[in-house]
Structures are given as C-alpha cells and as structure tokens.
Amino acid sequence: MYQVRRVHIGKTVQLDELARECGRLYSQVVVSFWRTVRHKGIWLGPKHLMRWYTSEKLHAHTADACVQAFFASLKSWRERKKAGDPDAHPPRHRKWYFRIEYKRSAMVLKDGKLRLSNGRGNAPLILNWPWELPKTVVIHWTGTEYEAIATYQQEQPVAQPQGEKVAGIDLGEVHMAVSHDGEQTHILNGRLLRSKVQYRNKLQAQLNSRIDGRMKKGSRRRKKLIASKKRQLGKIKHQIKDIEHKQTTRLITTLYEQGVQTVVIGDVRDIRQNNDIGPTNNQKIHQWSHGSVRFKLSYKAERLRMQVALQDEHYTSRSCPHCGYVRSKVKGRVFRCPKCYWSYHRDGVGAVNIRQKYLGQFPVVGAMAPPTGIRFYPHTRVAREQSRENVCVGNYTEAAGL
Ligand SMILES: [Zn+2]
C-alpha cells in the first residue's frame, strides 16, 4: 500500500538540466530500441538497454528509471492493444525533458533537508523536507513549475474494521456508485461528473473543428490554439479526477463507519468490448469511468482494512431481489416486479443483487430502508486523516422521488 505526497518546488537551472538529461537518455532508448526492431527484428529488454544507456550527470538508478519508464509505457501499450483499445500507440516520441526519478538508494534526509544524489562528482539536488524519508521521489514538470511526488510505503494500517457487514457496490453512469449493506443503501450522485464529461466532449469537438478547419498547418495561431486546448482539457481532467476522489472517499468512509468489512464491487469489464449500442450510447459507455472509480474505491477500502471483492454483475440490475424474476427491461427510476410487486429504487437493486450474489443467497427476502444519497461536497478532505464528523449523509427521498 502506497501513499503519495506532492510538493511544488519551483523552477531552477539545475532542475532544468536534470530533466533535460533524463529526456536525452529516454530519447536515446526510444531511438535505439525501435532501430533494433527495424533492422534486426529484435525486441530488446530493459536489462540490455540499462547496461548501454547510462549518464555521467545522473545517479545510476535515476538513469535506470528513464530506461524502465520506456518499457513501462511499452507494456501499457501492449495491454491496451490486447484489450482492443483503438487509441493505443506505442511510445515512439523522443522527449526534450523527462521526469527525474530518485530511488531510496539516492536519498539522505538530514535536518529537514532531503539530499538527492546525482552521482559522484555532481551537485546533489537538495529539497526542504520537513517530513519523513520517502521511498521514491519523482520530479516532473506541471506546466508552470516542477513538482516532486514522493511515495511512501504505508507500514501501519490506518484503522481496524468496525464490523462484519458486507456491502455490494454497483457502478453506473447515472449514479457513480450505489452501495447496499443489508440495511442501508447509499447513492453517490454522478450528475456533476456527468456534466463535466459532457462539457469536455463539447469543448473538445469545438476546439478540434477550429484547429482542423480553417487554420494553416504550422501557423502560429494554430500552435497557440493547440496549446490552449491542452490547457483547457487538462483543467477539466483535473476537475473530474477531483470529483471522483471526493465522492469515493465519502462513500468508503460512510461504509466504514457503518461497520462494513467487505466491499463487493460489480464487475462490468465485459461491457466495453461486446456491446455496440449506437454511437451516442457507445461514447457514453466508453467514457464511463468505472475503471478509475473502481480503482479508487478499492484502494480506499483497502486502506481502511476492508476486503475488496469483484462480483460478476450480469442480470443484477434486472432481477428482482425478492423473487428472482428477471425482467427484460427496466423502465423508469423505480424497479417494480411484475410477479411479486416488490418495488425499490432502480439503482439500488443492482447493489442489493450484487451483494446477494456474492453471499450466495439469491434471491432474498427482507425489509430495506429507502436509499440515502451522498451529495457532492466540494470541500471534502481526501487525505488520510479524515475526521469523523465530516461525513454527512443527506436524505435522498426527495431527489429519488420515493
Ligand atoms: Zn419479484
């Protein structure tokens, strides 16, 4: 389990030079790797290239990290290609500047200063560091200044579980996530996230048409607009990430407080590859961020020592949790069983069924509380020390129309 600390460290000539040197090394790896593929048909591994490409200006392990970074993106390209992603491209571009990575072997912490070695005979990089010694430090350019990202291995578990409950979580497009723990149903509202995604699509399309339409290739105006597009889309990307973090933290904290020990997340991974449901809905499904929401929910739950399990969620949103009848289609926001007349908020049904399927008691009978919605609070703290009183669970009754 890792935790991360981000520190802004400004811009200095030394940082520029180091980043430039990492870029040079990375570019050498890119060029020589693909050259060997082209001429000899051989795909070299990291151990060959790490021996060939070293630098006089960097710590040996920092130089290794540049080589490893190339192979990491090669690996991620292979995985994405395998998953059928049409946007997957292998790492082919050379880079002027590249991130500088320091491993534990290159660090000394003394008197609140972190001394990062750049190899014998070179000036070390020194950062003010009133915290403990990290495991790795990665320095990258944010667009305005350098940022150091320090990772820590978390040795002590933060918390002990408070109960034995099992909660099912259903990830969705309308609602980011819905949970059911046997008694309570919580709904994470996805409206704000959805509006951000829609705005991003619109903005992207507008800017693309301006860039591709009238402007001359290579013109200054075009370059300016491309830079502006990158900036604007980057901002929205951060906002989306922020919402996901705040919402998932809130849900997991709420579940933890209610004594949940096991979190069962509905597995929707098949959905992307197999379904073709028209261009508009396809876009929706492809941009549905269940991957990142699931990831965030999982690691946040694990941080609180909860267990995380995945459960196949076929038919879970269409089956009646009371009698097991599978409906062909669910219309409206309320699930009503035509056989036994059991009814419940539609989005809660998936979570109820995922939980029951995991527990092996499908179908089930029982009285359930109406769902409570978890509203988006812009000032949620996502850090590790979340104070207990901060968790507010609003009443969902009004919004759900129940
Ligand atoms: Zn029924």
Image: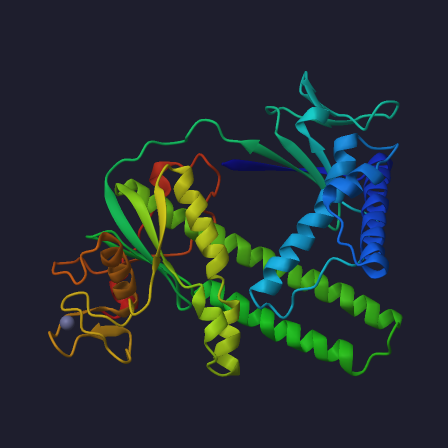
Q: Position of residue 72 (x, y in %)?
A: 67, 49
| Residue 53, visible in the rendered structure | no
Toward the top, the furthest residue is: 111
The number of discs equals: 0
Above or below, 251 relative to 270: above
Q: Quadrant of residue 186?
A: bottom left
Q: Position of residue 191 (x, y in %)?
A: 43, 66
Q: Residue at x 67, y 34 (%)?
A: 137
Q: Nearest the camera: 364 or 332?
A: 364
Residue at 83%, 61% (x, y): give it. 38
Q: Residue at x 50, y 77 (%)?
A: 282
Q: Is residue 208 above or below residue 157?
A: below
Quarter holding the C terminus is bottom left
The residue at 84%/71% (across/down) is 221
Q: How is the image coloured?
A: rainbow
Q: Is residue 308 above or below residue 102?
A: below
Q: Is residue 261 above or below residue 376?
A: above
Side of 219 relative to 10 (left or right): right
In this orientation, which residue lies closer to the viewer: 272 or 298?
272
Taking 34 as reference, is 299 left or right?
left
Looking at the picture, how far across and down is residue 162, in whole percent? 27, 35
Q: Is residue 50 left or right of residue 262?
A: right
Is residue 333 visible in this depiction of the protein? yes
Which of these two is toward me, 36 or 243?
A: 36
How far across and down, in percent of the image, does residue 227 sit? 77, 63
Residue 271 quadrant:
bottom left
- 345 on left or right of 30: left
Q: Quadrant of ligand 1?
A: bottom left
Q: Nearer the viewer, residue 343 or 262?
A: 262
